[in-house]
Image (cartoon, rainbow, N blue to C red):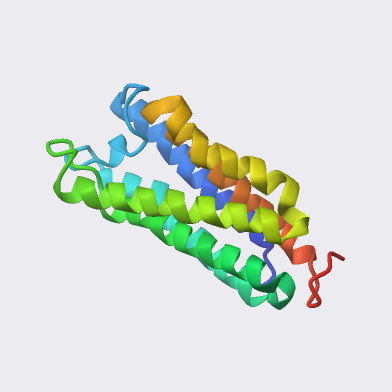
Amino acid sequence: MNGVRLWTVVAGAHACTLLALLLFAAAQGVPSPAPLAWPGAAGMPLAWLFNALAWVGPGLVVALALWRLRARMPGAGLGGGIALRLGLLAALAFAGQGVWPLDPTALDGGASRLHAAAWMLWLLAFGAGAVLSGVAVPAVRWPALPICAACLLSPLLLGPIVGPRVVLGAWWAWTLLLVVRLPDIDKTGSQS
């Protein structure tokens, strides 16, 4: 990623997820109340491709971008460093959702449990990272805290269909916020 701005790489990863979600749902005739991961469920046509384009590839790209950002940000402080590590963990869990796809014959067992565990790890690491970045890093404070609220409250308040879609949008906003705003912090921790 030398010479390439991290925000363009992260935006591209998010665009890949969005396009995969839209194209595969349309091509497969997935109903709108279905889970976001449904096009990648076991037995769906080209499920492996959907999982690679929607979850695994974008998750690994965002993980690499956040890892690179952390390596370049010694001035982010302890809280900012932990927030970036939580973001890295969340990105790896995001990728894990494609490694362990849903099993439509056993939504409460087998591979579906692993998929749900990856989703929950992604949600919790992302939420904790957003809170910590909002508290510890003044450069991202204002946007990070509302993003965190959307992440943690929308599954509870909006239900299992709309909630995850809001969380996904909050994830895109938070990761872009980090890669856009944090590079402006110099080695002393102050914003330049």
Q: Is residue 9 left or right of residue 103?
A: right
Q: Is residue 142 visible?
A: yes
Residue at the right extreme, as displayed = 192
Compared with residue 186, is residue 14 higher up or lower down, i.e. above or below? above
Q: Quadrant of residue 1?
A: bottom right
Q: How many marks?
A: 0
Residue at the spot 39% in from the left edge and 57% down from the top edge: 93
Q: Is residue 5 left or right of residue 19?
A: right
Residue at the spot 58% in from the left edge and 65% down from the top edge: 84
Q: Is residue 101 left or right of residue 76?
A: left
Residue at the spot 46% in from the left edge and 63% down from the top edge: 89
Q: Quadrant of the C terminus?
A: bottom right
Residue at the spot 46% in from the left edge and 26% down from the top edge: 158
Q: Quadrant of residue 191?
A: bottom right
Q: Is residue 53 visible?
A: no
In the image, 153 versus 39, the foreground residue is 153
Q: Position of residue 20 (x, y in %)?
A: 42, 40
Q: Position of residue 66 (x, y in %)?
A: 57, 65
Compared with residue 55, is residue 65 higher up or lower down, i.e. above or below? below
In the image, 23 versus 146, the foreground residue is 146
